[in-house]
Amino acid sequence: MIVVTSRALCGRPFLEQMELIAEAGPEMVVLREKDLTVAEYRDLASRCLGICERHGVPLSVNTHVEVARDLGIGRVHLPMGVLRGTDVSGFELVGASVHSKEEAVEAESLGADYVIAGHVFATACKDSEPRGLAFLRDVCSSVDVPVYGIGGITPENCGDAISAGAHGVAVMSSMMVADDPSGLILRFAVNSGVRSSGMSGRAYL
């Protein structure tokens, strides 16, 4: 499982939630936080990096490639608009957010090692209609890199995403409000099966 952050959703202080999430051992955490200035994001990323490193969980920088380079973080996750115009050489792991099979194919051609595709199911985070499992299936069949479904993913429907061909799922809202992130990850694992990741070697959904 990839955890995508949104500190605005947290019911407790964000860094406390980050500590619990890192303790739970997801495959990776993508630090999203799109509302911050570059300086604010760099400070938060530095703090989160320390938390993640203590627990052996990879941290990925969202959008701010320069921050990743400054902090020595070898992982970035980018929207397509940024990936198209960014030199991503030197990073050990590059991810992209995609919303169509065409974008997924383009992301792979631009050097993405994995893609997060969504939104799959209805979610309070998005006003638009979900793209559904047929969309996810199309993305998965169009690329060779791992595909993670995002958007309304729950322990109850994550198995459907895996059956559609996804290598795993990415989760934001439920992990931000979870009192017990470890228990939540276990529920995902029980419902969809834990698979071996080719990206980091960690167990993931």
Image (tube, rainbow, N blue to C red):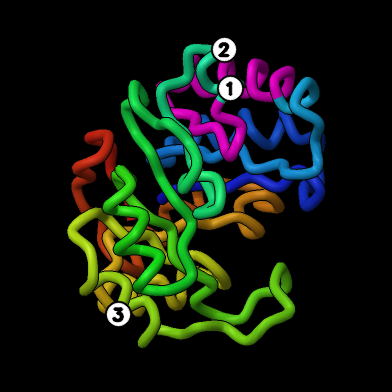
One can see residue 18 in this view: yes
| Label 2 SS | helix
What segment is highlighted magenta in the picture? 42-65
Compute the Cα span from label 2 to label 3: 37 Å
Dot 3 corresponds to which residue?
Answer: 138
In percent of width and height, residue 76 lies at 47, 34
Quadrant that contains the C terminus: bottom left
Dot 1 corresponds to which residue?
Answer: 66
Dot 2 corresponds to which residue?
Answer: 70
Most common secondary structure along the magenta stretch = helix
Dot 3 amino acid type = Asp
177 sits left or right of 147 in the view: right
Task: Check whether the beta carbons of the residues at disc 2 and disc 3 lie within 8 A of each other.
Answer: no
Please tell me which residue is depicted at 71% across the width and 53% down the height of the picture: 177
In percent of width and height, residue 171 lies at 53, 57
163 sits left or right of 10 in the view: left
4 sits left or right of 139 in the view: right
Compute the Cα span from label 1 to label 3: 33 Å
Between 17 and 144, which is closer to the camera in this rendering? 144
Compute the Cα span from label 1 to label 2: 6 Å
61 sits left or right of 169 in the view: right
One can see residue 187 in this view: no
Task: Check whether the beta carbons of the residues at disc 1 and disc 3 lie within 8 A of each other.
Answer: no
